[in-house]
């Protein structure tokens, strides 16, 4: 049986106070598919706030999130142990607070979303897997109605479609999704001629975005508005058409709204979104036309569920609860679309990201 590894990103420094947390950086665990347990294999220290990770070609890349510069790191993953070994850093002064990254293996590029500078940076991925020089900086402009959170652009995620032809960048500050065509010759981003931008209702605050496995639909979590927005997606032209907006919260809820991650179950039957503040996971069944119907709204087994992932079989859900300093592993009912019992709680300082990978 193949060995399954869980990788977790963390805050090593509190983003608000800049005070050191107890985190060592990236955490590496052996994941037991049968009982959901985790066993710590290694920690990978040395980088400030490796809060988001991406994988490709036997390598791991981290976005190191702090104010002042865009910062990414490359690691080679040991094929036997799964432990990442540091290769190099790339620091870009024109960026600030790198919160999300995506890889394009075809053109060998790393794309980053830089929250406080409101831009995207693309870097070359060299033949040995390390990071090369920055290739392009794409600056966003604009604002929206929330004066505290939307006075300027805040690029929050970068998302490459299933065919690898277009990159869609969510911008919390401008209430928009910018659409770029990926130039396969030079590996640069070009504003999409068919549709440059998809606007969302003012004040929603786009955060994370995911394509359905069928490539025909896409889903957006809105951090400030507390919704999932459903789109039809035209893969041939890289265009979006909004068709539904559904709440992630109970109608009676009047508390803190801070929607986090969004993802699709491996079988494509369900969409999940995390509610930080309400400390819950919203689950929706996917209809044939891509629209959603809520099937569950369950507690996240901790506080401030920032990120989550499925195992390959789709019957386990792993949740990073940042403010309760734990990773929670629970059952997921693949027929009913409901979150089941807690199987394992792993203490870890300030977790922000989780992902499973199988070793060869």
Image (cartoon, grey):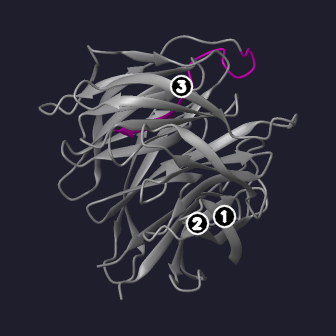
* Residue position for label 2: 317
The kind of secondary structure element at disc 1 is strand
Residue 154: x, y in percent?
Answer: 57, 25
The tag on residue 117 is 3
> At which x and y percent is residue 215?
32, 41
- At which x and y percent is residue 245? 60, 28
In the displayed structure, does residue 278 sit left or right of residue 81? right
Q: Disc 2, disc 1: CB below 8 Å? A: yes
Mark 3–mark 2 Cα distance, whole angstroms, equals 33 Å
Q: CA distance from mark 1 to mark 3?
A: 37 Å
Q: Which residue, given by chain and number where applicable, does mark 1 sit on? A: 339
Depth check, front residue: 359 or 47? 359
Residue 253 at least partly seen: yes
Q: Choose between 44 and 278: the one closer to the eye.
A: 278
The C terminus, quarter of image:
bottom left
Return the disc, 1 or 3, that comes first in the chain's sequence.
3
Q: Is residue 41 above or below residue 150?
A: below
The circle on residue 161 is: none
Q: Is residue 243 above or below residue 219?
A: above
What segment carries the magenta color?
Answer: 146-160
Residue at position x 31%, y 39% in the image: 123
Mark 3 lies on a secondary structure that is loop
Residue 6: within the magenta?
no
State the residue lying farthest toward the left: 185
Give me the residue at 66% from left, 18% from top.
150
Q: Residue at x 32, y 24 (%)?
A: 180
Within 10 Å of disc 2 (Cα), the crowding (few <14, some 14-19, many 20+) is many
- In the shown orientation, is residue 136 left or right of residue 298? left
- Say above or below: 86 vs 120: below
């Amino acid at each position: 049986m193949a060995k399954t590894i869980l990788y977790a990103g963390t805050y090593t420094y509190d983003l608000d106070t800049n005070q050191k947390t107890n985190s060592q950086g990236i955490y590496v665990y052996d994941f037991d598919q049968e009982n959901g347990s985790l066993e710590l294999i290694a920690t990978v220290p040395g980088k400030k706030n490796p809060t988001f990770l991406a994988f490709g070609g036997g390598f791991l890349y981290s976005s190191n999130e702090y104010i002042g510069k865009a910062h990414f790191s490359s690691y080679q993953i040991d094929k036997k142990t799964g432990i990442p070994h540091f290769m190099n850093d790339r620091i870009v002064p024109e960026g600030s607070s790198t919160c999300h990254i995506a890889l394009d293996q075809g053109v060998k590029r790393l794309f980053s979303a830089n929250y406080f500078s409101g831009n995207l940076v693309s870097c070359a991925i060299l033949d040995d897997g390390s990071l090369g020089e920055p290739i392009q900086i794409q600056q966003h402009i604009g604002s929206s109605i929330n004066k505290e959170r939307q006075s300027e652009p805040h690029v929050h995620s970068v998302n490459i479609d299933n065919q690898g032809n277009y990159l869609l960048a969510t911008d919390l500050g401008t209430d928009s999704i910018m659409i770029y065509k990926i130039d396969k010759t030079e590996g640069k981003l070009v504003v999409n001629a068919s549709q440059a931008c998809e606007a969302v209702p003012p004040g929603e605050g786009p955060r994370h975005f995911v394509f359905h496995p069928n490539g025909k639909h896409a889903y957006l979590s809105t951090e400030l508005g507390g919704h999932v927005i459903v789109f039809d997606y035209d893969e041939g032209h890289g265009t979006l058409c909004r068709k539904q907006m559904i709440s992630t919260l109970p109608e009676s809820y009047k508390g803190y709204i801070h929607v986090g991650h969004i993802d699709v179950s491996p079988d494509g039957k369900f969409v999940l979104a995390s509610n930080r503040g309400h400390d819950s996971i919203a689950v929706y069944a996917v209809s044939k036309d891509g629209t959603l119907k809520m099937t569950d709204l369950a507690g996240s087994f901790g506080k401030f569920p920032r990120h989550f992932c499925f195992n390959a079989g789709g019957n386990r859900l792993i949740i990073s609860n940042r403010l309760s300093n734990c990773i929670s592993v629970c059952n997921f009912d693949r027929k009913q679309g409901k979150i089941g019992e807690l199987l394992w709680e792993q203490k870890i300082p300030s977790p922000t990201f989780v992902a499973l990978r199988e070793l060869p």
